[in-house]
Amino acid sequence: MNSPADPIAISILSEIFMVDQLARGRIGRLLPKGMELSHFSVLNHLAHVHDERSPAELARVFNVTRGAMTNTLSKLEMAGYVHIRPDWEDARRKFVSISPSGRQARDAALEAVAPVLAQLAQSSEPEQLKATLPVLRDMRRMLAGPEE
């Protein structure tokens, strides 16, 4: 016989789902014209890693299909926000890096969402927010499952 789900776990996931939905809506409306949340997320990631990534690596990081990531990267490349080059040792592979205009677009997007981020930072004590991060990261890792 299955035991009922833990009410605390249900409440936590419900809150996470609502926060996700509200954050996506609010941030999405503030992004510069033509920029989607997926575009901002990829640009932000590339700005932080300071290195090239393959489309497959990016798809894995964002938990999307390779096709979905290819679509996002194509739009970013058309906008001039990323550079996509072939792997010089294996022509079947590609590498993606953020361009200077991509960095500018990401910075403009960050500036546009800064008021929401400031509100979020002020919503709780800094120590509470810092303590939340390891818990959320552990949840993400557990939900992602074992590395393949």
Image (cartoon, rainbow, N blue to C red):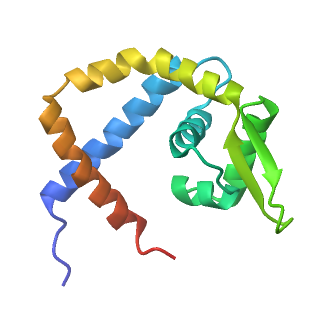
Q: Position of residue 6 (x, y in %)?
A: 15, 63
In the image, is residue 37 above or below residue 13? above
Left or right: residue 116 versus residue 49 is left
Count of picture labels: 0
- Quarter-wise, where is residue 9 in the image? bottom left
Q: Which residue is drawn at the image coordinates 67% and 51% (left, top)?
A: 69
Q: Which residue is drawn at the image coordinates 25% and 46% (left, top)?
A: 133
State the quadrant of the N terminus: bottom left
In the image, is residue 72 above or below residue 135? above
Left or right: residue 91 versus residue 6 is right
In the image, is residue 98 above or below residue 10? above
User: Closest to the observer: 3 or 98?
Assistant: 98
Q: Position of residue 142 (x, y in %)?
A: 33, 66
Q: Residue pushed farthest right?
A: 91
Left or right: residue 91 versus residue 141 is right
Q: Which residue is drawn at the image coordinates 77% and 30% (left, top)?
A: 80
Q: Position of residue 16 (x, y in %)?
A: 30, 45
Q: Which residue is drawn at the image coordinates 71% and 48% (left, top)?
A: 96
User: Closest to the observer: 28 or 137?
Assistant: 137
Q: Position of residue 99 (x, y in %)?
A: 71, 33
